[in-house]
Image: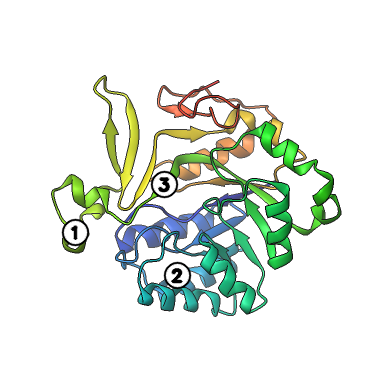
Amino acid sequence: MKFSLGPVQYFWPKAQMQQFYQDAADSSVDIVYLGETVCSKRRELKFEDYMAIGHMLRDAGKQVCLSSMTLYEAPNELRELRKYIDNGEFSVEANDVGAIAMLQEKALPFVAGAAINCYNQHSLRRLVGMGLTRWVMPVELSQHWLDTLLSQSVIQDIRDCFETEVFAFGHLPLAWSGRCFTARSENRAKDQCELCCIKYPQGREVASQDGTSVFVLNGIQTQSGYCYNLINQLPTMQGMVDVVRLSPQVTGTFDWLEKFKANLNGNAPQALSKTDSNGYWLSLAGMASG
């Protein structure tokens, strides 16, 4: 089983991003995803910067994948996507079906991100036929669902053609919108946001009246209020999951990476905090912890 770092979901300053990826190069992680997946206005790092970081990570022995945006709204965003697709060195994680179509035109292999609505064996088989080599399971699905899908006869002859990756740590990306909720929370229009989300390196919490953290606002993206944490479910993934994904956090990411690796066989379980959850994997309510 391999471990990956998903793309940074938040808007961090350039120096912070560069330091994070230097730490990633020095870490024991196997796969690193690079790229802006939320908002095209976040331009602290440009395509050339991501490529330079990719070269550094590759030299450190990491597998590098460029992640596309999840919601495309303008022609200039598609032009940027074309740069990713034509990079000539690294594979691409498609988080939008339009990106899949453009990759298929070039006959390029790709990773299907968790935002791609692949919920059954027929969709998965279709994507493999289009060039999929790794599939990130949608975050709201369960261990039972994954086990059932992978045992279906319709994909048995292609089971060795793709890897399965599971989002296992971090605030779950749940939805995207044409509106920017972070800007709205500051009474700003989306087009005059002044990149205010850079002030919230972990997103902006939305709590219920009783103080429960319900959501995290991250630009046009809505995340889970609780941090998803499947560290104690790793033994149940054996034989099903090829890659375990950790989503970068502002602090502690690499400490958690080592904790995950130590508990791969269930030898170092961790007590979850009150703001951790694992409900979706256990077929429970998403905010639950079992």
The amino acid pointed to by label 1 is Cys
**On residue 50, which mark appears?**
2
* Residue on which the image places disc 3: 175
Q: Looking at the image, which residue sits at the far left?
A: 187
Q: How is the image coloured?
A: rainbow
Element type at mark 2: helix
The amino acid pointed to by label 3 is Ala
The amino acid pointed to by label 2 is Tyr
**On residue 91, which mark appears?**
none
Please give the name of the residue rendered at 15% of the width and 47% of the height, measured from the top-left corner: 186
Gap in Å between the C-alphas at discs 3 and 2? 25 Å
The answer to whether residue 241 is left or right of residue 166 is right
The answer to whether residue 122 is left or right of residue 245 is right
- Residue 91 drawn at (x, y percent): 60, 69
Figure quadrant of the C terminus: top right
Are the residues tagged 1 and 3 within 8 Å (C-beta)? no
* Residue on which the image places disc 1: 193
Q: Nearer the viewer, residue 26 or 151?
A: 151
Gap in Å between the C-alphas at discs 2 and 1? 24 Å
Quarter residue 259 falls in? top right
Are the residues tagged 3 and 2 within 8 Å (C-beta)? no
Q: Taking 228 as reference, is 18 above or below it?
A: below
- Residue 76 drawn at (x, y percent): 36, 77
The answer to whether residue 24 is left or right of residue 39 is right
Q: Residues within 10 Å of mark 3 (few under 14, many from 20)?
A: few
Q: Comparing marks 2 and 1, which lies closer to the viewer?
A: 1
Q: Residues within 10 Å of mark 2 (few under 14, many from 20)?
A: some
Q: Comparing marks 1 and 3, which lies closer to the viewer?
A: 3
- Residue 198 drawn at (x, y percent): 25, 54
Quarter residue 178 falls in? bottom left
